[in-house]
Amino acid sequence: MREEDEGGQGGGGGGGRKEGRAGCTPLLTRLKDSVPACLGRGSRMEENQNFICGVVEGFYGRPWSMDQRRILFQWMQNWGLNTYLYGPKDDLKHRLLWREVYSPEEEGQLRTIIEEAQSRDLRFVYALSPGQDIVFSSPCDLTLLKRKLRQVSELGCRAFAVLFDDIDHSLCQADSEAFSSFAHAQVTIANEIYRFLGEPSVFLFCPTEYCGSLCSPSVQKSPYLQTVGEDLLPNITVIWTGSKVISRNLSVDRLAEVESVLQRLPLIWDNLHANDYDSRRLFLGPFKGREPWLRSHLRGLLLNPNCEFEANYIPLHTLASWYRAGSKEGKDVETDYCPDRALSAALHDWMDELNQPLQAGRQSTRADPRSSRAKTPDKSDGTSTFRGTSVVAKLPVFPLNSSSPPPSPTKDQEEQTARESEKRQPERASNFTSRPGGPTGKAHKSQGRGLCGGKGLLSEAQVRLLVGLHYLPHEHGPSAQKLVQDLTWLKSNCYLVSANSKKISPHKVDEWRRRASEFLSLCEDIAQLHCNVVGGANRAVLYDLYPYVWDLRNMALVAKAFVCWLDGHVLNDSATLASWKNCFHLCGKTDELGDESEPWAFKGGVSGEVQMLLPVGGSNELFTHPPPLFPTSRLYNIRPYHSKDKVELYRMVRQLHLRSHCAKESGTSHPDVVGDRCLGPCLALCPEYSFVLEDELGVCGCILGIMDVRSFAKRCQSSWLPAMRDKYLPNGGHSNTQDLIKLMEEDQGEYPDSLLYHFPSQLRLDTLPELVDVSVSRTLLVALLVALKANGSQGVFCEVQPTDRQRLEFLSKLGFLEILRGEARSREGVVMARLL
């Protein structure tokens, strides 16, 4: 449930009401059909007055699969939750095509899942959202609405919900003539349906003004809510989300205010862990900000959690702890529930789940000793996919249930990838952890990592790191707080280690480098976390969490390279313009948003905050891209270039040149020919804008930058080309040396002023084609753009031959603009990106 149309907030509830409670207009007709006997008052559940607590599947996005819902019911039964509400926004027949009845095949699936819930003593609530296009005064629409709900009731459903959230407040002309207000129209329909269904013990109504921020002009003075409170039948429960769509806290005073207007206890539809509004955020933190004693002010609470099913273990586990704490009697009820203790307990149990060999479809042959039903056949389907069974049924797809995530790479595919990696040159010794480049100039410690290709176990420390980085919408976990705070401090104090810093206290420099070392260590832990998640046995968790872990891994790679680069490379200028300091945006900390803003006011979570702390943080196209289809657990590192890297970089570009030209290396050719032409000038004249990409096998890519092409060309003419003429003398015994010198001279040809005025900088990107995760090439590019922007560059271009359409397409997707020109000698392909 989420606000989509802010423009209609003030349109609800205007005008007087007709006929009092539940009055139907003459335009509405009642169905003559008999009500199913199973829905009579005599069939009400004995626990009618019990507190409703459980899960609502009500998010926007791909609905959960049938198998995932079965696992959900198993969790809920084990933990003591009692209610599940079915209402995924993207199920066509729940919302967009609400008039259509379910097909026989869909009926069978829905009956199965209803029976599965009931067999586990769970209340199954079926929700329908007709509000987008229903004509309230239309007898036909009313008939279709009753027909749809009657079909579901005949499948065994006993509880229902009618939702009018996230819709426009306006009424069509026919409805305006039939009803006194928008609220009156909704209430009339809800009352009619409630009576038609035999006044079920649980019948929920979601108003269009479902939180305090959507009420006009306020909760107490809203004509819309007043109509709902006065005219809605008293046994119908009203859904509420709190003061906001996503409420940080629920207070007694606010709930009492709502209860007074609605004239009944509300049921909280809790969006605390919902993440459908931001594709880069995930919430693994505990249920928080709702004291257990609030139960006496509520009819119930249903948590609308993450879209990714596997991400909801801790949220639901801690919700159950909260529910049990509220059930206890005693003087210290307020202190019975502690989010931190509940998180520790949930995390302990989740460890077993994370390290089980589950496939993406939740298939396993290992019995679950914690489940009371793991060793017994499922009542509703003898071939269910519970973890305790060995037979897997291929169930048909429920409405809008997309298929399972892409399957894990097969053993053959993994072996093929390993063989391709082994084909890389043997001389690429594993120097992943031995290269300089840290802020202190010392080599980074490997911590015994090695290769990460096998199935490993996640440690509790790593899971805590995972949760801390993806905590709650209004609050970061400890690890995320430290990541953002340290980067903010290092960025603000980088003048201490700038390229031309003077009279800086050694103590302050040491402090900067100490904090930089801690930051780099945290970034390495994030990279290792990504490695272990991908290499873990639980593929179900992998495919749900991977996009978020992968996104943060890439962000950590860039941030780590940036902090390493800051040590000695940033220019300490005081100019008001073209200064990287003025290009930063203020960090949009969610802690500073407070209760007055919804969490989507700043998108991206901790990844977004780290992004905005980078000089090119405003270029979203550099950071928003889909993850690779097949995740890889290989560790990558991006760092500034060091002089010791020259040999390996020369070897790499020589091999790339031989591959692209399908040529064999000639014994008469100098081994440095290709390297001197492609990399030599940049590595010799501006090494501070060079970055190296490496994996566990060694260097696998590099990117070189030129800050000012005009001044660089002059330096090449005065120093680099004379050095090359001396190195490649005509009588030096190497073939084609004069041709090489000529090509080097042409490489430094003039560029049009119209290009260099807007794009004064240039780059060259080279990576090995064996890279499994091509996204690291993008991350490598971002590392250079960050450095160029930090020292004042306004734009960068890259030369690409027009025939190299693949590279042109790749760079275009990164936000580069493509032009073709023919006036600069042999140069015809240029792609550019603005860094303003």
Image (cartoon, grey):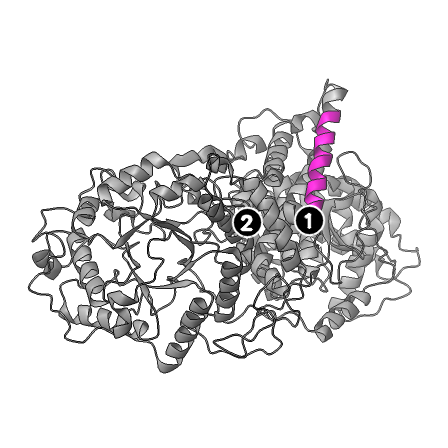
Tell me the magenta residue range. 510-526
Considering only order in the chain, which callout, 1 or 2, is on the residue closer to the N terminus?
A: 2
Q: 403 or 149, which lies in front?
A: 149
Percent x, y of residue 532: 70, 56
The residue located at (46%, 54%) in the rendering is 305
Instruction: Check residue 313 for magenta coloring.
Output: no
Quadrant housing residue 662 = bottom right
Q: Is residue 492 left or right of residue 604?
A: right
Q: Secondary structure at mark 1?
A: helix
Q: Position of residue 658 (x, y in %)?
A: 79, 66
Residue under the image location 58 percent in, 78 percent down: 392
Res 3 seen here: yes
Residue sitting nearer the eye, 141 or 377: 377
Q: Pinpoint residue 593: horizontal percent, then vertical percent.
A: 44, 35
Quarter-of-image position of residue 829: bottom right
Amino acid type indicated by mark 2: Leu
Q: Amino acid at mark 1?
A: Glu
Q: Which residue is mark 1?
A: 460
Q: Is residue 765 left or right of residue 588?
A: right
* Distance in Å between CA atoms under marks 2 and 1: 14 Å
Of 746 and 705, which appears nearest the observer?
705
Q: Is residue 753 visible?
A: no
Q: Position of residue 317 (x, y in %)?
A: 53, 52
Vertical position of residue 95 compared to residue 706: above or below: below
Does residue 167 appear to the left or right of 468 in the view shown?
left
